[in-house]
Amino acid sequence: MSSEPITDPKVVRPYGDTTGDGMIQLSFTLPLPAGKRGEGAALQLAGKMGVDPAMVVHARPIGDGHTFYVVYGRVNHLVEPAKVVVAERDYPLLSPKDVNTAIRDRLRRKMVVVGACIGTDAHTVGIDAILNLKGIAGEKGLEYYRELRVVNLGAQVAVADLVQAAADEHADAVLVSQVVTQRDAHLHNVKAMSAAFREAFPAARRPLLVAGGPRFDELMTGELGVDRIFGRGTTPREVASYLAHSLAHTVRSRP
């Protein structure tokens, strides 16, 4: 196959050693012991995925009868960027000052944000990076915004307890982080959370429901029953800007 670069901006091909050569790298685990048969199985799998030719560049036993593989090889597929569907940011990215001004002008009070990791998820790094004053990547967390009152419930919070806390705090928004994804636990947990809030709150008083985590598809808001999903790499400023933007469209009543 020719490795001439693809010059048409309407299509792109994976890049490995030289532009447009179609080379990719895959990693996966097979329930086979390390050895030639296992490597052969890894190559067979890669071939069925359209990687041809392929080579095993790394194989490491990771347990009794299991081996982790890295395979490198070429694919013939092209990608058409214009046909890629993603969730574009549909609101302006505001400075902390502008976020505070928007909240003060529209609510005339502080906006209450309750955050938690629900279910058995004990990974608080993500939710803490968004909520805590320290923040991440040079950006202060939501606690830095003077017009936001942040209640961080921490990890392994039951859905029922989250709903009760949101009611007690008169939350305007609920932020849920999910990192544990085995057997789609993050999806099941968020669906259960959404259903619980819709049962517990009248539509006019339900807080904004926001889910975040590295394995979420940002296009699944409708399926999961939330107002917004934030994926990997989200910053506190993006979340704060979204919360301020949401006020222009929906101001939930309070008792």
Image: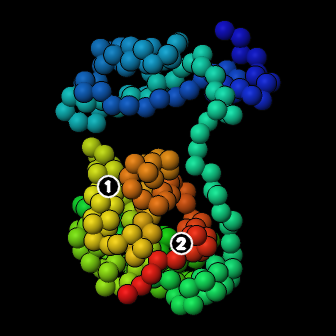
Residue 12 in the image, given as x and y percentages of width and height:
69, 27
Instruction: Tell me if residue 198 can be seen.
Output: yes
Q: Which residue is denoted by mark 2 in the rendering?
A: 250
How many numbered marks, from 0 up?
2
- Left or right of 207 in this view: 90: right
> Residue 79: x, y in percent?
64, 27
Residue situated furthest top in the rendering: 1
**Mark in front: 2 vs 1:** 2
Q: Secondary structure at mark 1?
A: helix
Which residue: 31% across, 46% down?
184
Name the kind of residue labelled 2 in the image: Thr
Q: Is 70 on the left-hand or right-hand side of 20? A: left
At a point 31% along the width and 67% down the height, the residue shown is 197
Could you classify mark 1 by the number of other residues whose Cα lies within 10 Å: few (under 14), some (14-19), or many (20 or more)?
Answer: some
Tag 1 residue: 191
Q: Is residue 56 above or below residue 244?
A: above
| Callout 2: SS | loop
Give residue 37's quadrant in the image. Answer: top left
Picture coordinates of residue 213 (x, y %)? 43, 56
Dividing the picture into quarters, in which one does residue 116 lie?
A: bottom left
Q: Residue furthest bottom?
A: 109
102 over 174 or under it: above or below: below
Estimate the spatial distance between the alpha carbons at disc 2 and disc 1, rounded to whole Å.
22 Å
**Counting residues from the N terminus, which is met first, the one under dot 2 or under dot 1?**
1
